Amino acid sequence: MSDRAERGPEEVRPPAPEPHPAPYPPSGAAPHHGAFPTPGPHPAAPGPGLPAGQAEPRHRLHPLSPALHGAKSLVVVIAGLSWSTLSRVGLGWFAVMAAVLALGATVLAVISWYNTGYHVVGRELRVYEGLLWRRTRAIPLERLQAVEVVRPLLAQLTGLAELRLEVVGSGKTEAPLAYLSVADAAALRQRLLALAGRAPQDVAAPEAPAEGAAPGDAAVPPGRPLHAVRNQDLLLSQLLTPQAFLVPFGVAFVVAQFLSEGSWSFIAVASTLTAMAGVLLQPIRRVLDDWNFRLARDAGTLRVRNGLLETRAQTVPLHRVQTVGATWPLLWRVKGWLRLRLEVAGYAVGESDERNRPDRLLPVGDLRTAETILAEVLPGVRLGELPLTRPPARARWLNPLSRQVLGAGLHGKVFAVRSGLLTRQVVVVPYARIQSVRVVQGPAQRRLRLATVHADTAGGAGAAAQDRDVAEAWALAAELTARSHAARRAG
């Protein structure tokens, strides 16, 4: 448990920014959930080709949607029946059981598709679903943060796409419309962003795959191309991870166990394979997620396209970037590689599926490439020129190995912090994104006259200058407060 510093105020916070027009309203209200609503005060927004005042009809999802959902259910059903069921009832009855359960799941998917619809009413997107328990989700478009087009493998094979909405203040991705045709998804995305009040350059339709292209083929996102990650570098970077280095030892252990015991039971084999799959899951997922990574600049946004089995087209508004982090894993330093990640306001920090979050800026690359990309996000900021200073010598009692690595400093535009011994990391926070500044002391820090300065952001990440001298910590906090206030006024 930490304690506040004994001198000075308990917490140093920058004053509230002066009101100024913003493209997004403040967060707070959650989308409405409930039964079918009565018509609201806004008239129904006419769709393309509809006369003014005529209500837009509800639209259904693509007719192939039940088939895709049924295919997913089939995999879950077969996995749920388990190997033991097959051994007890035989292959024939097992196939019959799987077919009956899959047919039932498909029928339920068809009924769900028939009772699912969406349309735009005024400045709301309303999604209707359910048969016995009907539910309507009314999503105010003023709170719309982003609309993303995602194409899982089955959707790529059938020419469909899934539309996912990110709403400011929501704890999860709202209203995933699965599935629509690629053209309908692009048109609906453009219309929703236009109604949300986004600038015309921000509502460009997502790129569609070329005719005849295979699933996973690279496509160039709209805008000015910035960088394309080579798939060979991506594969090699994941081989240079602790998980990959542990695989030969795991295989050797399995072989040794098998040779010593002569044979293994099914449970022993399944447990071993599950353990090895768990070791390999993270690097394999990163390769699949970042395959054909393409980055482009389009006016005030970054356009990102990536993925092999599931392609994603994401738009990152630059004015909502809270922090940028550069990471040098230990084994990557041999190649001089690093990765860049960013924190974007409006996306839930606790999102269960972190792949939905647009935090990838550079999966792997050298310092020169990273600085080129960083200059697009934070002009004038270079990783090699950050004024980082170490904590005082007495901080070695708290950080005997990493004291030489720790650093913090004030750049002209950002607050920068360095940390990490084996995995080196640098985090930069623009002054205008700092929401509050805290000076914190633990019991050991209090005895050593040290303190940690936290710069918090709306995204919940921020940066912390560890184990600074107490007087320096309070001076740093005051300077951060002043610079954040000035940056907000200038913005």
Image (cartoon, grey):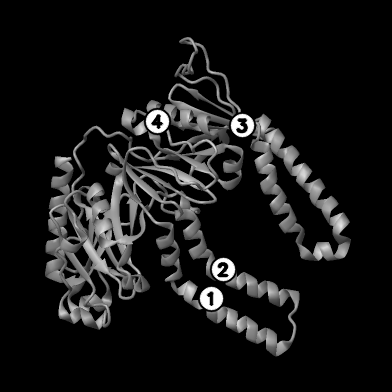
Q: Nearer the viewer, mark 1 or mark 3?
A: 1
Distance from label 2 to label 4 (Cα)? 39 Å
Residue furthest out toward the bottom: 260
Distance from label 1 to label 3 (Cα)? 43 Å
Which of marks 3 and 1 precedes in the sequence? 3
> Which element carries disc 1, helix, strand or loop?
helix
The residue to which callout 1 is attached is 247
Residue drawn at x 48%, y 54% as measured from the top left? 289
The answer to whether the residue labelled 1 contacts the one labelled 4, judged by CB atoms less than 8 Å apart, is: no
Task: Establish if 323 lies above or below 55.
Answer: below
> Which residue type carries mark 4?
Leu
Q: Nearer the viewer, mark 1 or mark 2?
A: 1
Q: Nearer the viewer, mark 4 or mark 3?
A: 3
> Which residue type carries mark 1?
Val
Graded by Cα atoms within 10 Å as few (under 14), some (14 to 19) or many (20 or more), the crowding at tag 3 reads: some
Residue drawn at x 20%, y 69% as measured from the top left? 407
Distance from label 4 to label 3 (Cα)? 21 Å
Distance from label 1 to label 2 (Cα)? 11 Å
Distance from label 1 to label 4 (Cα)? 46 Å
Using residue 423 as the reference point, say whether residue 150 is left or right of it: right
The residue to which callout 2 is attached is 278
Q: Nearer the viewer, mark 1 or mark 4?
A: 1
Residue drawn at x 32%, y 64% as measured from the top left? 338
Graded by Cα atoms within 10 Å as few (under 14), some (14 to 19) or many (20 or more), the crowding at tag 1 reads: some
Residue 459, given in percent of the width and then of the height, sits at 34, 51
Q: Quadrant of residue 489?
A: top left
Residue 468, given in percent of the width and then of the height, sits at 18, 71
The answer to whether the residue labelled 1 contacts the one labelled 3, judged by CB atoms less than 8 Å apart, is: no
